[in-house]
Image: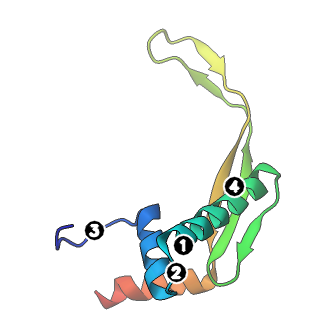
């Protein structure tokens, strides 16, 4: 790995950090990360919101059908309603991110 600072975090980075910080094997850390993500996904599929205080909450939002058009043909169509996951940051998360950007 190069010395370049990345501007993103991958799931594998979470596994490595967790295993180092808590002296876990990479397999143990991977199981923990995967399980947490699976719980969030399964909860949203079941229409149950996931809330982590001072971090944020994951919810599903229902988007109603809307009128649109096919840009190639100009034909008017109506899209189906759909549900999408949504993350709303908590107060602690917002304050930490805001402080980091103001300190730059």
- Mark 1 or 4: in front is 1
Which numbered disc flags the more N-terminal residue, 4 or 3?
3
Per the image, the residue denoted by label 2 is 24
Q: CA distance from mark 3 to mark 2?
A: 24 Å
Which percent across, then down, holds residue 77?
64, 17
Which numbered disc flags the more N-terminal residue, 1 or 4?
1
Q: Residue at x 70, y 83 (%)?
A: 53
Report the disc number at residue 41: 4
Which numbered disc flags the more N-terminal residue, 4 or 2?
2
Q: Residue at x 66, y 52 (%)?
A: 85
Per the image, the residue denoted by label 3 is 6
Looking at the image, residue 18 lies above or below residue 66: below
Which numbered disc flags the more N-terminal residue, 1 or 2?
2
Whether residues under marks 1 and 2 lie with C-beta atoms below 8 angstroms apart, the answer is: yes
Left/right of residue 43 with respect to residue 78 in the rendered view: right
Which numbered disc flags the more N-terminal residue, 3 or 2?
3
Using the image as rendered, state which of residue 25 and residue 95 is in the foreground. Answer: 25
Q: Secondary structure at mark 4?
A: helix
Whether residues under marks 1 and 4 lie with C-beta atoms below 8 angstroms apart, the answer is: no
Q: Tell me the quadrant of the picture where the N terminus can be found.
A: bottom left
Which numbered disc flags the more N-terminal residue, 3 or 1?
3
Per the image, the residue denoted by label 1 is 29
Q: CA distance from mark 1 to mark 2?
A: 6 Å
The answer to which quarter of the image holds residue 67 is top right
Q: Residue at x 36, y 82 (%)?
A: 101
Q: Secondary structure at mark 1?
A: helix
Using the image as rendered, state which of residue 98 and residue 15 is in the foreground. Answer: 15
- Mark 4 or 2: in front is 2
Whether residues under marks 3 and 2 lie with C-beta atoms below 8 angstroms apart, the answer is: no
* Residue density around tag 1, few if under 14, some if 14–19, many if 20 or more, within 10 Å: many
Which percent across, then down, holds residue 52?
69, 77
């Amino acid at each position: 790995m190069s010395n370049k600072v990345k501007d993103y975090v991958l799931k594998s980075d979470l596994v490595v950090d967790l295993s180092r910080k808590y002296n876990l094997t990479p397999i143990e850390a991977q199981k923990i990360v995967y399980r947490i993500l699976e719980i969030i996904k399964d909860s949203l599929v079941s229409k149950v919101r996931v809330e982590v205080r001072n971090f944020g909450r994951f919810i599903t939002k229902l988007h109603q059908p809307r009128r649109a058009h096919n840009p190639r043909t100009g034909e008017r169509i109506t899209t189906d309603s759909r549900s999408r996951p949504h993350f709303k940051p908590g107060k602690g998360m917002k304050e930490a991110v805001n402080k980091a950007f103001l300190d730059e």
